[in-house]
Image (tube, rainbow, N blue to C red):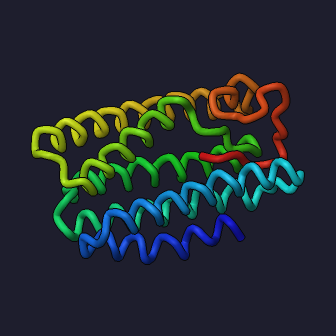
């Protein structure tokens, strides 16, 4: 329920971003979404109710919510279409690779550090767009995060081909993003 509540938060948040609404409300709704994202994972682990469905639903809701905000920024002219297209193509290719890996080796490895850094740079770029940063700052954010997006995609691609060539996934393939590095359950899909 916490995970799905982020979708309810995303709609008014995207609307406020689109119409350049109150920054106070934008920050409040963003903090509420971040809090539900943090609590749903902690609650699932604490109550021992972590599930494959939750591991898929959580990042999907994050992508939908973040996508709505980014789309609002594109419509209002704060982010260029090419930037969002780059994000979309990268994520689509990673998801397609994850599906192929799941079919072949029975498990989707967790996200890698390069992917987490790229997502953080996208968040900073979105924040700069929300705050209507000066053009030189915005250009720097766009160029830096695009470089990190492309780099992370290449890292995912290298790992994908290594795993597919071997026909199996070793524990070391999943260590960069797993919460519990001592034991990896191959029956549960992990976050892409």
Outermost residue on the left side: it is 135
Residue in view at x 75 percent, y 26 percent: 170
Q: Is residue 157 visible?
A: no
Question: Residue 7, position in %: x, y?
Answer: 55, 72
Outermost residue on the front side: it is 24
Question: Residue 39, position in %: x, y?
Answer: 69, 54
Closer to the camera, 108 or 77?
Answer: 77
Outermost residue on the right side: it is 48
- Judge left or right: residue 115 versus residue 189: left
Question: Residue 184, position in %: x, y?
Answer: 81, 34
Q: Is residue 154 visible?
A: yes
- Judge left or right: residue 72 versus residue 136: right
Residue 115 against residue 16 in the figure, above or below:
above
Residue in view at x 18 percent, y 44 percent: 138
- Judge left or right: residue 105 versus residue 77: right
Residue 53 against residue 14 in the figure, above or below:
above
Closer to the camera, 152 or 62?
Answer: 62
Question: Residue 166, position in %: x, y?
Answer: 68, 27
Residue in view at x 64 percent, y 47 percent: 191
Closer to the camera, 12 or 77?
Answer: 12
């Amino acid at each position: 329920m916490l995970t799905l509540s982020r979708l309810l938060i995303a709609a008014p948040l995207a609307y406020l971003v689109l119409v350049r609404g109150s920054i106070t409300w934008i920050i409040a709704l963003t903090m509420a979404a971040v809090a539900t994202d943090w609590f749903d994972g902690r609650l699932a682990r604490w109550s021992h109710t972590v599930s494959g469905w939750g591991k898929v639903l959580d990042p999907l809701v994050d992508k939908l919510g973040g996508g709505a905000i980014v789309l609002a920024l594109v419509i209002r002219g704060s982010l260029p279409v090419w930037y969002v297209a780059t994000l979309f193509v990268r994520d689509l290719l990673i998801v397609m690779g994850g599906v192929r890996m799941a079919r072949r080796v029975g498990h989707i490895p967790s996200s890698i550090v390069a992917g987490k850094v790229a997502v953080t740079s996208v968040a900073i770029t979105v924040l700069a767009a929300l705050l209507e940063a000066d053009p030189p700052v915005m250009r720097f954010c766009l160029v830096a995060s695009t470089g990190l997006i492309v780099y992370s995609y290449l890292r995912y691609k290298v790992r994908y081909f290594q795993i597919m060539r071997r026909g199996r996934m070793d524990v070391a393939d999943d260590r960069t993003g797993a919460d519990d590095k001592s034991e990896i359950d191959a029956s549960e899909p992990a976050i892409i």
